[in-house]
Amino acid sequence: MKLGLALPFTHAFSMPQYLALVAQAEAAGYDTLWTGEVGGGDAITTMAVLASHTTRVNIASGILPVQTRTPVVLGMTAASLGHMAPGRIRLGLGVSSPIIINQWNGLPYERPLEQLREAVTIIRAVLAGDRVNFEGKFYRIRNFRLLQPPPPRPVPIYLGALGPRMLQLAGEIADGVLLNWIPPEAVPQSIREIEIGAKRAGRNVADLEIAAFIRTLVTDDPAPARAWLARDITGYVIVDSYARFFAGCGFGAEVEAVNDAWKAGDRAGAVRQISERFLDGLGVVGPAEFCRQRLAEFAKAGLTQPVVIPFSADSDPKPTVARTLQAVAA
């Protein structure tokens, strides 16, 4: 089973501690190291660090919002990384959310899928070394061309996808798909949506990487971890797009109960509405052998790359993260 590992750089680690985890992950045999970008560190800085301190493992952004950088800048960034680590860079892109794009960054959030399609078209042209002239609804590019050769090996583009329209777009224009907060039982339906887009473009869905983030913690004391996971899930359930997605996965009663409590101002009550069934579907928490078996179930459901997100309920996450990444790769 091919495994990915989400390993963003955070304030919890010194740089030597972080690089020790990176070396441990590469030695353990992970296929790809993923780093995201929401409101903490930026992904590109971390990707450059990973590219310069590894020799084998792939390095992926999971996920960069297309709205916060121009497509030309994203193309130049991917090209630079592609020269640093030829054949090992994956550019993961997405449309984020109105809160992050509009409220946090002061940018418009309008017709995001259309904007993403335009951005991917431009980025591919930049990475190919083409002279780019593009006239779209979101971007107007005149006479741009890289002032260096394109990367010696292609940089695949992945799309972060949740709902049917984004999944279909990924099948149509991307080289891979990154799913999030998905139970294994829902993976086949997501793949069917990806396949619709792939067929529309005359492509084979089997040629796409299908990855998914999976919150994972190896522990013999699961109660604190499950409590932490319930709080984390609650923060997503109150987001409309995730609420719809979770309801479609069979958690409609929980979604309704969480949002009712949240709107009433009962934050703790909202967290209590995250059922054991909900936790079992979205998280992997328990002894090492259980976690390995559960991750294998995600692969059996159709993922080509389960991506472990090692989390910790402890004030010092370093021992837990190191233990989890080593144990599940064994």
Image: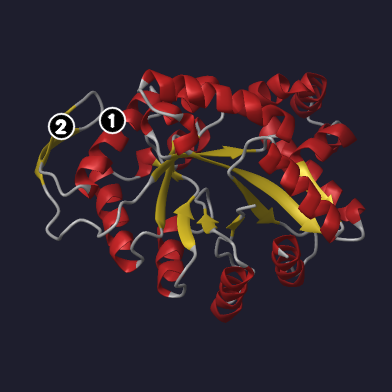
Residue at the far bottom: name it. Answer: 16
Camera-side residue of 3 and 207 = 207
Disc 1 versus disc 2: distance between alpha carbons? 9 Å
The x, y position of residue 70, in whole percent, is: 28, 43
> At 34% from the left edge and 24% from the top edge, which residue is drawn?
114
Image coordinates of residue 165 in percent, x first then y, are 48, 20
Can residue 262 be seen at all in this image of the molecule? yes
Q: Identify the element where label 2 is drawn.
A: strand
Hey, which residue is sitting farthest left in the picture? Answer: 143
Whether residue 328 is situated above or below residue 14 in the rendered picture: above
Question: Which image quarter holds the C terminus?
Answer: bottom right
Q: What residue is disc 1 on?
A: 118
Q: Mark 2: which amino acid? A: Phe
**Residue 86 placed where, x, y %?**
33, 63
Crowding near the residue tagged with mark 2, few <14, some 14–19, many ≥20 C-alpha atoms within 10 Å? some
Marks 1,2: beta carbons within 8 A: yes
Q: Earlier in the sequence, mark 1 or mark 2?
A: 1
Q: Which residue is drawn at the image coordinates 67% and 38% (left, top)? A: 181
Q: In front here: 159 or 271?
A: 159
Question: From the viewer's perspective, is 248 left or right of 261?
Answer: left
Q: Height in image: 160 above or below 200?
A: below
Q: For the residue marked with disc 1, what is the amino acid?
A: Glu
Q: Is 5 placed above or below 94 here?
A: below
Give the residue at mark 2: 134
Q: Looking at the rendering, which quadrant does residue 254 occupy?
A: top right
Q: Residue at x 39, y 38 (%)?
A: 106
Residue 44 screen position, x and y as percent: 40, 58
Task: Tell whether 156 sits left or right of 294.
Answer: left
User: Neighbour class for label 1 at 10 Å: few (<14), some, many (≥20)?
Assistant: some
